[in-house]
Amino acid sequence: MKKVLLATLLSAAVASPVWAADYRIDDQGAHASINFKVKHLGYSWLTGRFNTFSGNFSYDSANVEASKIAVDIDTNSVDSNHAKRDKHLRSADFLEVDKYPEATFVSTEFKVTGDGEMIVYGDFTLRGITKRIAIEATKVGEGQDPWGGYRAGFEGLAEIDMADYGFATDFGTVLLELHVEGIRI
Amino acid sequence: MTKLYYSDARKWLHWLSAMAVIGLFASGLWMVELGYYDAWYQRAPAWHVNVGLLLFVATLARLVLQRQNPRLKAPPFQRVAARTAHLSLLLCIVLLALTGYGLSTADGRPLLFFGVEIPGMGSVIPQQESVLGEWHELIAYTTMVLSFLHAAAAIKHHVIDSDDTLKRMLIHRGTER
């Protein structure tokens, strides 16, 4: 028993980078948001958001390349501030939430492009279709919070094409505006 | 004293309601399939709401007037069956109006009745617009099944039993007896 425990601890120590810290996205305090915008008739931007999601990331400012992030989004929680439109967005014309209640993003690579700037590559699954996307991300800040915790926050921008994800209605490119604040666990 | 016939006003209410029910069902089936760029995409639901609210008011009146129904000359089973069908139909229409209202105004925006704002309901249950949308559809189909049975029974009375069940609902007929 002791040996197993020791082996587990050792392998855990070897597998994880020395300073990398794990964070839980602060969805409880709603210090994170997944927003989207898409052109309406080509005349203006329609914005909306997903209200329910959860995720974790690990991040170390000294070794950004080793970072990881995974997020689960409840597609039912789509909110464009208009009930009948939300109903339409949940239908088979768009998100088809009965069949695909979840969208996920799992990072595969963090590429540093500058001080606090990075491109996060990863697999984005929507409507059951997985595609590799790139998120241009910037660290906003990190440090102690007033309540004894430690937080790190980022913003990110990504683009997806509705046609790539088999939407029955195609409004072209959707821009994703992401804000993530994690609490160290 | 028990009445033997329906008043002309109630006959009109009945036939206009019948037209509204069929029209609303057909328009509902049609409008949910409309593409976003269709010219009717905004107009059709607006008219569906206008007519639906008129039907709602008419149905409330008809529910109140049920007490004044003429007595049916029929065996007990038929009387109970007819009564149940009538009340179920009226109840379905009321439920259709309520679910329609709840799904249309889940975000608290007012409902427009011929341009007049009726205060919105807001959201009481999660994803209210989607949940009530499914109920609205289900109750609409139930209403059509009940309507079909109701019409089939009336025609059966007219053709097979050769009685005046159908005739006494016809306008300018039956009141002359």
Image (spheres, rainbow, N blue to C red):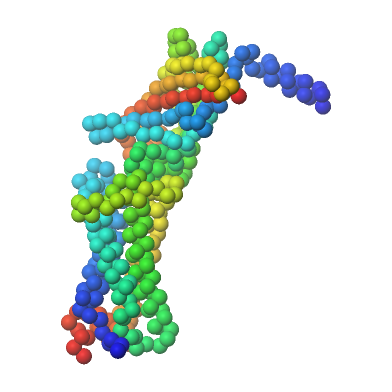
> Residue shown at 28%/86% (left/top)?
B3
User: In front here: A38 or B90?
Assistant: B90
- Answer above or below: position of B58 versus B36: below
Q: Is residue B78 left or right of residue B118?
A: right
Residue B162 seen from this side: no
User: In front here: B172 or B7?
Assistant: B7
Q: Is residue B177 left or right of residue B86?
A: left
> Residue shown at 23%/45% (left/top)?
B38
Q: x, y (%) of residue A33?
A: 44, 29
- Answer above or below: position of B148 versus A9: below
**Picture quadrant of residue B176:** bottom left
Q: Residue furthest bottom?
A: B177
Q: x, y (%) of residue A10?
A: 73, 18
**Picture quadrant of residue A119:** top left
> Residue shown at 37%/73% (left/top)?
B87
Q: Quadrant of the N terminus of chain A?
A: top right
Q: Is residue B160 left or right of residue A10?
A: left
User: In front here: B156 or B55?
Assistant: B55
> Residue shown at 35%/37% (left/top)?
A80
Residue B172 seen from this side: yes
Q: Residue furthest front?
A: A146
Q: x, y (%) of residue A43?
A: 22, 31
Q: x, y (%) of residue B134?
A: 40, 54
